[in-house]
Image (cartoon, rainbow, N blue to C red):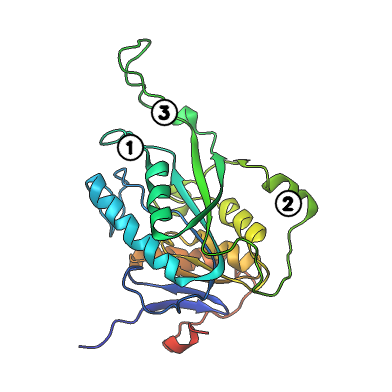
Amino acid sequence: MEKKETVFFRQADIIILNEDFLTTKEIEENSVDLIVTSPPYNVDIKYNAYDDRIPYSIYLKFTEEWLAKAYSLLKEDGRFCLNIPLDKNKGGQQSVYSDLISIAKKIGWKYHSTIVWNEQNISRRTAWGSWLSARAPYVIAPVEMIAVLYKKRWRKTSGSGISDISRDEFIEWTNGVWTFMGESKIKVQHPAPFPIELPYRCIKLFTFINDLVLDPFLGSGTTLIACALTNRKGIGIEIDKKYCEIAKKRLLNEAFLNQKKLNFVSDKSQIRK
């Protein structure tokens, strides 16, 4: 049987792989400088190729598997920015952030800090549990979390050593509360996009120019757009071909506007260092 082509798109040092992150063999171990991703939340978001309403125990098992795979791909001084909810109440109250951090630590990830992303979306609430009553109120924080983890050592010694972050950016972004709006699902044509501002800040704060950034759940391509805009190498993995197409179009429109030619490649050796 002919092997499925996984390299969906490549332009310079930006690559989209159309495959399952858990089974990919296209990325060398100990080669990635930073992982930035927002995995499925298991809150019944309507993806095309993923069931986002599985039993919580199975979701945690899936989380353990992909976190272990991600750990193997990161350099010794690599970092990891994990965008996840604080908690969820669809299908039962679950402390998602706490549970995922516990799993990550069991695998070997080391904890550095947490950034609270204030999405300012409290107006979108549709449920309070019990209205004006102590019977069963729901407390819902209009924030998401960005857990900052690392593999072996926090001090970064690999890479070009060249930073491009400004003084004002550094002062603002090292404050652990980031306030900016989320992204429009309709505009991006994806059920759960995050705004470019999120990976853009993570990339400039935690990597050097020309470092390699990975997003194992690429979705609409936001992380790769941020890579292109900051002169980082980027690999995004997306199981759904439709979302790969959306990511490619967004790269063309938002990152490669002045590029005249986009290249599709079949030489997988180009992915490896």
Kindly report which numbered mark, 2 or 3, lies closer to the viewer in this rendering.
Answer: 2
- Residue under numbered circle 1: 94
Residue ranking furthest to the top: 133
Residue ranking furthest to the right: 167
The percent position of residue 3, horizontal first and vertical second, equals 27, 85
Task: In the rendered structure, find residue 189 and report the number of the disc placed on it.
Answer: none
- Judge left or right: residue 257 versus residue 192: right
Q: Quadrant of residue 125?
A: top left
Q: Amino acid at mark 1?
A: Gln
- Judge left or right: residue 71 versus residue 52: right
Please tell me which of labels 2 and 3 falls first in the chain: 3
Q: Amino acid at mark 2?
A: Phe
| Residue 82 visible to the viewer | yes
Residue at image location 45% in from the left, 71% down from the top:
73
As measured in the structure, the alpha-carbon distance from the residue carrying label 1 to the one carrying label 3 is 18 Å
Q: Secondary structure at mark 1?
A: loop
Q: Quadrant of residue 172?
A: top right
Task: Give 257 or 36, whichever is nearer the viewer.
Answer: 36
Kindly report which numbered mark, 1 or 3, lies closer to the viewer in this rendering.
Answer: 1
Please tell me which of labels 1 and 3 falls first in the chain: 1
- Residue under numbered circle 2: 170
Residue at image location 48% in from the left, 50% down from the top:
83
The percent position of residue 201, horizontal first and vertical second, equals 63, 54
Q: Secondary structure at mark 3?
A: loop
- Residue under numbered circle 3: 125
Q: Amino acid at mark 3?
A: Arg
The percent position of residue 85, horizontal first and vertical second, equals 43, 42
| Residue 254 visible to the viewer | no
